[in-house]
Every structure is written in C-alpha cells, then in structure tokens.
Image (cartoon, helix red, strand yellow):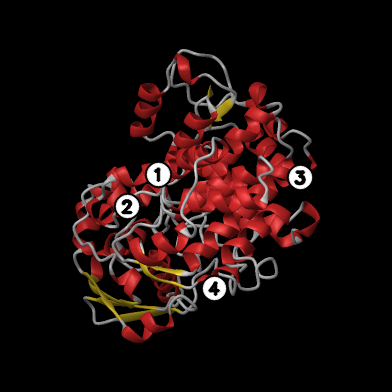
Amino acid sequence: MKDYLDDLSEFACLTLWDALPIEVKDRTKWIVADSLAVIAVGMQAPEMKKLVRAHITAQSHGNSWIIGTGLKASVADAGMLNGCAGTWVELDEGSTLAKGHPGIQILPIVLAYAQDSAVSGRDVIRAIAIGYEVSARINYAAQIRPIVHPHGTFGVIGAAVALGVLKSFDVAAMRCLINVAATMGLATSYETLNDGATVRNIYTGHSAHMGLLAVRLVECGFTGEHDGVASIYGKVLSEQFDPEKASAKLGLQWLLAQNYFKLHPTARSLHSAIDALEDALNKLPEQRLQFDLIANITVRTYRLAAAKNNQFVVNSFGAKFSIPFALASILYHGHSSLDCFDDVAVANPGIQRVARLVTVSEELAYSERYPAEQCCDVEIDLTDGTRLSGHCRVMKGEPEFPNTLEQIHEKFVALGRKVWSRSTLEHLWAGCLALDQLDNASDLFGATEQLCDGMTDLTSTKEKY
C-alpha cells in the first residue's frame, strides 16, 4: 500500500519548476542571499580559519567555493566547511514549525554541487525548496527529545533529497535515499548550547557531508530500512512520529513559505524575550533606560525559551543562548548586533552584573500555546521604583509578522561588508534575486573574481572564488 514515504518521494521527484508557487521561489532566493552573508562572516571566526587551513589539502582541490575565503575545494569539503560556518554567528534562517534550521543544512552542499556540475539556477532553487520541504515536514511530524539538538539530524535528509533532485533520482531511488539518510544523523546534544561548546557548529556541516555520502551510497546499491524515518524519528530521536502530518497537504501548503529570517544573532527562542524587551522600551520617550538603575528583570515564557536561562556566560558562543545575557547586553548597547555577543561584551562586568539580575521561568499556559504562539513577558524593575513591562505573543519574522525583503537586504549588507566590498555585495544580491534566470548557477559569482577586493585570504593563494 502507498504510504507517506511514497508521497514524499513522489513529491520530490515529480514537482517541477512550474509547480513551485511564486512565494516559494522567491523565499528560496532570499534564503540563498541571506545564507551567503551569514556563511561568509561565520568563516572569519578564528576557529573556522584554522579549520580551513587544517582541512584543505592538495587533494581537496575542486570547483566549489569556500565562501568568504577566496578558496575553492571539492564538493564534499566546501559543503562541510560552508555548513559549519553557517551557524557560527547564529543568524541562519529557520522554521518554527519544523523546529530547526533546514536551509543552512541544505544550501551549502547544493551550491557546492551546482558549481561543480554546471547546474541551472532554476534547478538550484527547486532542489533547495524540495529538500527543505521534505526534511522540514519530517521534523515537523516528530516530537524530538528535548536533549537532541535539531542540527545534524533531519538536515541530512534535506541535503540528500536536494542532491537526489539534482541527480534526477526516480521515485524508488528517492524513497531509498530518504531511508538511508534518516539513519546518518548525529547523536546531537542540546547541552552544547548551555556549555558554549562550539562543536555544535559542525552539526550543519555534517548534514552537508552525510547528505552527499547518502546519495553516493544509494547510487552504489546500498539500501535502507523499509521505513527508516519512522524508526529514527519515532523511536530513537523521538518517541512520537505522525506520518500523516508529514504528508498532509503536501505541495499545497509549504513550510518553507512560513520560514523566518533572523535579525538578532541569537537562538531563535531568545527572540521572543528580545521582542518583549523592545515592547517595554517602546513605552519610554527615548526607548532607552539608565543601565545602572536596573534592579531586576523577570522573564516568563514558554518551555523551550525558559531553558535558555544561563546567568553565567563564559564565552561569545554561549552568549547567544542566554536570555539573561542577551537582555543585559542589548540594554547596555542599545541594539542587538553582533558586537552585543562578542568576547568584549562577555568580559564587560556591567553586562555580567545585570545578567545575574535576570530570572527566567516557564509559564505553563505559554508552553501550551507554543509553537502557534511564542509568548513572553518581560518586567524590568528600576531602583527608583519604576516598573516597565513588555509582551510578545508572536515573534517578528513568523508568518503573522513576516520579514521584508528590505530587512533581509539590510542584514545582508551589514554582515557582508565585514568580508566584501559594497560593489561585490550588490553584485551578489542582484545575482541571488535573479538566480532563476541563470543557465549556470556558477554565473552567480561571474564577475566576483574582479570584485572581491574585500575577501579574506587564508593561504598564500590569490585565487578568488
């Protein structure tokens, strides 16, 4: 009998360009543009620079860009490194319904493969969109254990499906691929966030690498379980998996069309507290308060956000996963850009003092309303007796309050200027928005070799992209 995996496999193989809704095509192009800037700035982290130097050898030569370095590598190496860099600054897009970040686990390997195989821009968009939708729906249908970090799990399926689309897998091969890829995820730990452990950033690189390997395995005749998805997402990573939920209204309602783009460099679950803080500050004439007058801050929110309650942040990575630190640093700086979460901010004794005045607790009613609503209350008590209150019901960026293309462009420029010149940035932005017009996706970077005077050299090579 036909089942949900047959539905997902047929959807992946038979959904052609003309069947993609305009909104899906557009948002996929936005994901490409947004991810390029996020990857490029993430690649400038000292650890990423060292990893590139240590990982790239003469055997790694290829046609695929290690974004933000001026270097090329093999499909596998570029996909892994770009995937790893893509989560470093915690600004990659995501899906609340899918409970994770599908795009950054799919796009790096698709772009790497496209550059090596002369794939059209339309096929790149189609592959990313379909890989995103299939993998997002699988995680949407599961109730992943709270200890499991979503990166490096369902992303392997998304990367594999996207490559299977580019390679024109038939329905039987696609079903086999989904089952094989389902078993190739990592045993990821959410505790990496509380510990500030940057090994977490390899999870998305793993998705890219294992997605490619899964395709090769199926091409060589390897097989998976009859329903590896139900085994992994119903018994191992999760104890509940609803197959009907995975395929309901497939092709009619797209989770990709309901994604969000991050405007704050933190875990998504912190954004509800940041939005509630903004709501409180909007009630002040100048939208700022005197930092030294803060007596305490109380946060009540849903379970997933309430778990981000670390008052004792020790490094920049951990700062992005702490509501106490995020609120303290934003109040100190007056904005929420990358420097609010860098090592200088972490070392600031004033920010650390206020972070320890922030208490975070779960509001059961809010947990019950999640994920449809992402409620949060923030109350700020000042030493002069003043109390400020703010509330978030639905985070900015969710379908009810969607991001605009202008916001994404502003973010693209703000991040990209740390790596590239303004002319390079505008060239890349225009190319991403016109990606569907390119016969060869590599032409996205066609003139970049002459434009990328802002690139960061990691070796003595002068090659640019």
**Three-letter amino acid code at disc 1?**
Trp
Of the two numbered discs 3 and 4 on the same chain, state the one appearing first in sequence.
4
In the image, residue 411 above or below residue 430: below
In the image, residue 358 above or below residue 126: below
Of the two numbered discs 1 and 2 on the same chain, state the one appearing first in sequence.
1
Kindly identify which numbered label has been placed on residue 317. none
User: In front of the other: label 4 or label 1?
Assistant: 4
Q: CA distance from mark 1 to mark 2?
A: 16 Å
> Which residue is the site of mark 3?
436
Which secondary structure, mark 4?
A: helix
> Which residue is the site of mark 1?
88
Of the two numbered discs 4 and 1 on the same chain, state the one appearing first in sequence.
1
In the image, residue 64 above or below residue 281: above
Q: CA distance from mark 2 to mark 4?
A: 24 Å
**Three-letter amino acid code at disc 3?**
Asp
Residue drawn at the location 21% of the way across and 57% of the way down: 352
Between 343 and 188, the residue placed more toward the observer is 188
Between 184 and 111, the residue placed more toward the observer is 184
**Three-letter amino acid code at disc 2?**
Thr
> Which residue is the site of mark 2?
188
Q: Quadrant of residue 330?
A: bottom left
Give the side of residue 146 with respect to residue 421, left or right. left
**Three-letter amino acid code at disc 4?**
Lys
Give the side of residue 312 with respect to residue 164, left or right. left
User: In front of the other: label 2 or label 3?
Assistant: 2
> Which residue is the site of mark 4?
245
Q: Quadrant of residue 367?
A: bottom left
User: In front of the other: label 1 or label 2?
Assistant: 2
Are the residues tagged 2 and 3 within 8 Å (C-beta)? Answer: no
Label 3, residues with CA under 10 Å away: few <14, some 14-19, many ≥20: many
Q: Position of residue 31 (x, y in %)?
A: 60, 51
